[in-house]
Amino acid sequence: MATDTHRGRGSEAGGSSGILTGATRRIENLSDAQFAYLLLAPMLVLMTVIAFWPLASTFWMSLHADALFGADALGRFVGLENYVALLTGEIDAELTRPFFDLSNPFTSALTVTFIFVVVSVTLETIIGFGQALVLDQDFRGRRWVRVAIILPWAVPIVIQGMLFYLLFQPGVSFLIDPLQSLGIFSATPTINSVDSTIIVIVADVWKTSAFMALLILAGLQSVDRSLYDVARVEGASTLQRFRMVTLPIVLPTVLVAMLFRTIQSARVYGLIETVSSCSTVPSLSCLVVSTFSARQYGTAAAIAFVTAAVIAILVMIYVVTYADTESGVI
Amino acid sequence: MVGAGRPSRRAVLGAAATGLAGGLAGCSLRGTSAAGDGTLVQFVANSTARDSQDVINDALHEAGLSEDVFVEILAVSSSTAQQQYSQWLSAGLEQPSLLRVDNGWTIPFILRDQLANLSEEIPEVTSRIEEEFFDAGVQTATGPDGGIYGVPLFTDFGLMLYRKDLLAEAGVDAGDWATSPPTWERFSSVVAEAAEATGTDHGLTYPATVFEGLSCCIFTEFMATWGGSYFGARENLLGSVGERPITVDSQPVLDAIRMVRTFIRGSDDPHALDGYAGGVSPQAVLSWDHQTALSDFSDGNAVAHRNWPYSILRTGAEDAFGEDLGVMPIPYSVPPEEAEFDGMGGPRSALGGWHVALNPNARNREAALEVLQAISQDDFYLAMTEEFGYVPPKPALLESQAARDIDVVGRYVDTLKFAGERAVPRPVSVVWPRESPRISQRVSATFAGDRSPQAAMSALKSDLEQIEQSVPEARP
């Protein structure tokens, strides 16, 4: 009996071993492309569950009215009405701030986001480029300069926000009185939309220029130094060497860095909430969060999709404008 | 070819891919906490309550809760609680069984059928609440069907804290202000005089940044003490959305704004009111919340300060201002009989406070109801007053000797009762979350001088009209 039992287990083990061997053999017989897809399959399943399904679900939400009454999260099916109401300004009064209002560009979501993206990315690129050029040089104490430039990038966003909040907080900061007497800021800049937008941009540039500098530095260090020697022999000035040698080689890297920063800037939210408030500096992401918090789920979903569309348009500008750069990195 | 004793490269890659996917999916084993013997009731409140879980359980057991029922307290930040509860209740979760809900957002949950009707579950408790508790607080837990959906945990009223020692130094006698507050005109002159005579930085401070507290409470008080309101008479505040009059551009509201501009921007402001002390408040109040403003007052930088009752415990303790702290109701400009809208005028405090509501899908429902019964007992309320400075939601309890005997807060129970009987609720409805940000933005803009009172309130009226009109369309 003991022998039978042993034999039975052995036969089960042999069966599972046979299945495993068969599966292994089948895998080994796959082409490289098929095997690559097989490896990607778990991730694709996962992506479907955690990314594509929520995306589709959010779009479905955006086609429904907000439910003010009853336990249901969503109201009746309204098709594209939420999008129409949003883009025509019909529901501006029901949002924390209007979606689009050119007459008050610092208090409407689309214009605030646009101002933030254009100004912060431009300043970060210029400053980051300058920092990268400095870091690319050999000089005594270079490692300390690198640390000093990169340090803001390591500061958590909440600490960064509190730093700038306190810097412009009346009764706490030494900056308020001189800035007010110079006519630059009001007495309470953290509740003034224009002042707060400027502060949020400065805070972002302070931190994120280091990110640009690091990426651009990587590009600069890939430049073949002998090209500069040739340029010098040819009599090129410093500016000409930059324009004719450095810039063309580094440009693809710069564009990738700008693309990353543009996408990140268009989603700005946390920095605004810590420095000022979404009510004062209403970015698109702020509008999504505030409508969601007010249980306007249909409206929030529509704004989220419009935000994604705005980011896609910004990305397309890069792609279309710079698609023919020599290395074709975008 | 597959080796006999070791995995192939592809097998390792396959395992890595599966493992990575599993890891990203957050597949992990999570333990469950043991409830131990007896019945566990989960109650979501804030971190203060969670840190005092044993004290609260002791108070509940003293108030009659069965010894085999234990309340586990979870903490959610007050700023995110509404959103968090909404998600939990929409998902039909059984836990937490009890929820601490702000009086300002209980009604929206009731209208969404997300809280249990306690009048059906524990009618003997709710009838006692209707008869004995502060009316204004009870109204904020009452549904359109007349049912009570929350047991008041504690109540809050806006109060004016002031430094008796500084007033005495300036030669002002404020002996009877505890239940007989002065007019704004007199009060602003007195605190300005005291600030100047004592070298104190500010006369009067209050939180007036762009936040819910400005629309729900601070501005409500300024308006109400002038006889004004967002929606006319007091009876309109908690109902008739879409049909009630919008009165933010009425004269009492404009006068209230002009008074505050005088306080903040001085007598030279083009919209300043004569007779009111100019510049008695710093411009910084426009960016202060409750904590920042209270810290400034606690540091001795202001003669008077508007805040909630919890601040009494912090500033009236012996190691703070002790008995030099005076507390009074909010000053006023127009007496109730002269107010433009019924129920307004005179010393009016904004209503705050929290209720405890029952999850309709609550686990251990009977035990949760027993906890609610214990919460409604006098002994529990007095224990909470002593421990946290919470104001009991029953006026009779404030008259009791037991309340007077409580350290620090006991000195001010007459003021608390006076303020509680004149409290004004915020106009809570399903659209209040949309109205509140608009109100605080417009009010802050005119306080700061960016827009005239008339222009700001006309724009606000237009916003509110559009929001209120969206409600009838959304009714089921």
Image (cartoon, coloured by chain):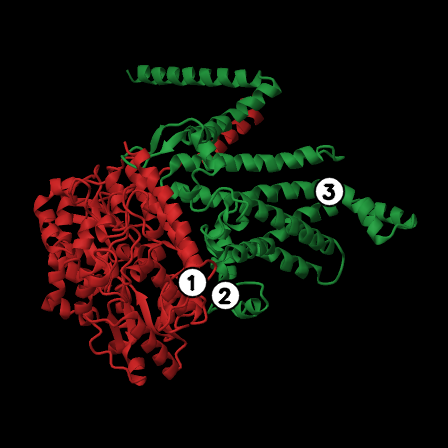
Chain colours: A green, B red
Q: Are marks 1 and 2 in contact (CB under 8 Å)?
A: yes
Q: Residue at the location (49% across, 56% down)? A: A275
Q: Disc number at residue B55?
A: none
Residue nearer the viewer, B11 or B1: B11
Residue type at mark 3 is Leu
Label placed on residue A251? 3
Residue found at x 38% / y 42%: B466
The answer to whether mark 1 and mark 3 are in CB contact below 8 A is no
Looking at the rendering, in which quadrant would you find the C terminus of chain B?
top left
Asked whether the viewer can see residue B6, the reply is no
The label nearer to you, 2 versus 3, is 2
Residue B88 in the figure: left or right of residue A92: left
Label 1 or label 3, whichever lies nearer to me, is 1
Per the image, label 1 sits on a secondary structure element best described as helix
The residue sitting at 46% across, 50% down in the picture is A278
Q: Residues within 10 Å of mark 2 (few under 14, many from 20)?
A: many
Where is residue A16? Give x, y as percent.
42, 18
Circle 1 residue = B286
Q: Are marks 2 and 3 on the same chain?
A: yes
Image coords of residue A154 (percent x, y): 56, 54
Relative vertical location of residue A57 with respect to residue B246 in this rendering, above or below: above
Chain for numbered disc 3: A
**In the orientation shown, which residue stands out farthest toward the left?**
B124
Circle 3 — which element?
helix
Tell which circle, 2 or 3, labels the residue nearer the N-terminal end: 2
x, y percent for residue A187: 50, 65
Residue bearing mark 2: A187
Query: Where does residue B303 sit, x and y in percent of width and height?
Result: 34, 75
The residues bearing labels 1 and 3 have C-alpha atoms spaced at a distance of: 46 Å
Residue B54 quadrant = bottom left
